[in-house]
Image (tube, rainbow, N blue to C red):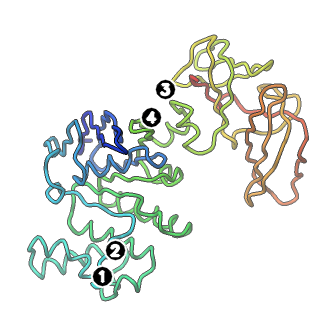
Amino acid sequence: MSVALCLQNISRHYIKDGKNFTAVSSVDLEVKSGEFLTFLGPSGCGKTTTLRMIAGFETPSSGEILLDGENITSVPANERQMGFVFQNYALFPHMKIFDNVAYGLKIRGESKDTIKKKVHEALAMVGLENAEGNYPNQLSGGEQQRVALARVLVLRPKIILMDEPLSNLDAKLRLHMRTEIRRIQKDLSLTCLYVTHDQKEALTMSDRIMVMQRGHIEQLGTPFDLYDDPASAFVADFIGQANLIPGILESKDGDFGIFSVGERRVRARLGKQNPPEIGKDALLVVRPENLSFAQGTENSLPVKLVNRLFEGDRIDYRFKIKNFTDTVYSMGVSFLPGMPILEEGKELEATFVPQAGVIIKK
């Protein structure tokens, strides 16, 4: 698969409140043709700034941007053959849907017949063939976002850039639009760069995810890689929920390690991205859904329940590890009608299979 986009040592510096501020620091990235790559991270981590530099809305302080091998670092945004889908749709309220989608083609000077054909095709791609005579305020939020997508698709860009396009939609619409955007992207083999701070959005839509923190790349990989083998405590905690239990790696046994938590020893996988050294402080990462309660089992920790939250489809039990720390950890148990509910204050064992835990450097 060919490389569509390449970032080489890209940085962006500002003067903020009279001080130097680094928004993006030495980012290197290769995006494959037809790939859906998501920039994921908290507010202020540099993901939107990186996207805007790729689009040409901001100029890098250093580094180069290559599109199909051509240096476009200094090329104006309107000459980069990229489409940008904004968070707020940015539709013209006084124009009908047909004219909104046709706007870029008219600027290009294409013929009326060509514009009509391409607009019909673009609206068909997003399932709005019959909406071309409406105005934006006559459509739902999800339909307006589809129009914004059609307006980009009609220009046949080499790359589509999306900056949190679903953040203004309600939860049910977001789920639907995730599926729609991914379907269109795969059907057309589009190269797509997508910015979000929503972990589930990133996990369900992406071929790869670039997790950013404080302007640099914390980890880059497939959703499975990041969830299963986080490179740091930040990634583990940001991708889904994670219990980060401190301890010491006592020994190694092939791909597994023996990890001490207080007076207990448990067995778990050794992280491949950031493996700890024997005898050093480390972290055991165990997802709440991979823990279960039992009595007298191996690979378990003594715990005391301190709280529980009923979430409909599951019960989130909060617990502390006995004789260890005051940190509260979490276990998610699927709820079934008639199942026994454990009371706060109950003492028992929290267990997991060794494959479900991963030990990383602290």
Residue type at mark 4: give it: Glu
Earlier along the polypeptide chain: callout 3 or callout 4? Answer: 4
Q: Position of residue 34 (x, y in %)?
A: 30, 50
- Point out the tag, 4 or 2, that comes first from the N-terminus: 2
The residues bearing labels 3 and 4 have C-alpha atoms spaced at a distance of: 11 Å
Dot label at residue 97 = 1
Q: Are marks 4 and 2 in contact (CB under 8 Å)?
A: no
**Dot 2 or dot 1, earlier in sequence:** 1
Q: Position of residue 350 (x, y in %)?
A: 80, 34
Tell me the amino acid under the disc marked 2: Val
Look at the picture and state if 87 lies above or below 52: below
The residue that appears at 34% across and 74% down in the rendered structure is 147
Secondary element type, mark 2: helix
Q: Give the spatial CA distance, label 4 vs label 2.
A: 34 Å
Query: Pointer 2: what residue?
Result: 147
Foreground tag (4 vs 2)? 4
Amino acid at dot 1: Ile
Q: Nearer the viewer, residue 189 or 109?
A: 109
The residues bearing labels 2 and 3 have C-alpha atoms spaced at a distance of 41 Å
In the picture of the structure, the residue carrying the numbered disc 4 is 218
For residue 252, above or below residue 90: above
- Report the residue marked by disc 3: 273
Left or right: residue 239 versus residue 32 is right
Q: CA distance from mark 3 to mark 1?
A: 48 Å
Residue displayed at 21% across by 63% down: 156
**Mark 4 element type:** strand
Badge 2, how many Cα within 10 Å: few under 14, some, many 20+? many
Q: Is residue 115 left or right of residue 49?
A: left
Tally of numbered tags: 4
Amino acid type of the residue that numbered disc 3 sits on in the rendered structure: Gln
Mark 3 in CB contact with mark 1 (< 8 angstroms): no
